[in-house]
Image (cartoon, grey):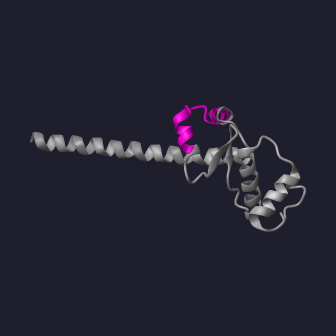
Amino acid sequence: RNAVAEELQAYGAGSSQQAQAAASIRNRAKLVSEVREALLLGAMSFSELKKLLQRKNHNQIIKEEELMTALNSPELEALQVRGVWVLVRTGTEANDQFRKTLLGLFRNRDSVTRQQIMDEFEKIYGERCKLSGYVV
């Protein structure tokens, strides 16, 4: 009789743990989505991003560890360059190629000219950048 009671308690605890794990996965997916949304607006420092997300989620505390996990998740494809976080990919190939060129340059330098960007783009992709001056 005691063995059955212990087994039921263990099953209940397992179920509770599974429910907590599922809730954690949902919260992480929501946070990744919100981080992507925020970074689509532009580059942000960790503290700016945390503040923005905390204002948006006033009923939930955004923990630094959870935010860092979201930023480093492979599905987000975010990168930290010179103290700010940016999305590596936007979904448009031409923009993504240009963005990768910029990120590569800014990893090594504080400032670059438009000509340096265009030269680096041509060197990497073997063709001139086709984005308009408005986008660049």
Which stretch did the figure color magenta?
A: 50-70
Q: Is residue 1 left or right of residue 69?
A: left
Whether residue 60 is in magenta: the answer is yes
Q: Is residue 130 left or right of residue 33?
A: right
Instruction: Identify the image quadrant of residue 54.
Output: top right
Q: Of all residues shown, which one is farthest toward the bottom?
A: 127
x 78%, y 68%: residue:
126
Instruction: Identify the image quadrant of residue 19.
Output: top left
Quarter of the rendering occupied by the N terminus = top left
The image shows residue 7 at horizontal and vertical percentages of 18, 44
The image shows residue 104 at horizontal and vertical percentages of 71, 51
Query: Main SS of the magenta segment?
Result: helix
x 60%, y 51%: residue:
76
Is there any visible trace of residue 31 in the rendered image?
Answer: no
The image shows residue 3 at horizontal and vertical percentages of 12, 42
Say above or below: 93 vs 41: below
x 64%, y 37%: residue:
53
Work out whether residue 44 or residue 28 is closer to the camera in this orientation and state it.
Answer: 44
x 57%, y 39%: residue:
67
Q: Give the number of callouts.
A: 0
Say above or below: 43 vs 100: above
The image shows residue 50 at horizontal and vertical percentages of 63, 34
Work out whether residue 13 or residue 126 is closer to the camera in this orientation and state it.
Answer: 126
Q: Is residue 92 left or right of residue 130?
A: left
Is there any visible trace of residue 69 in the rendered image?
Answer: yes
Q: Of all residues shown, which one is farthest toward the right?
A: 133
Whether residue 55 is in magenta: the answer is yes
Quarter of the rendering occupied by the C terminus = bottom right
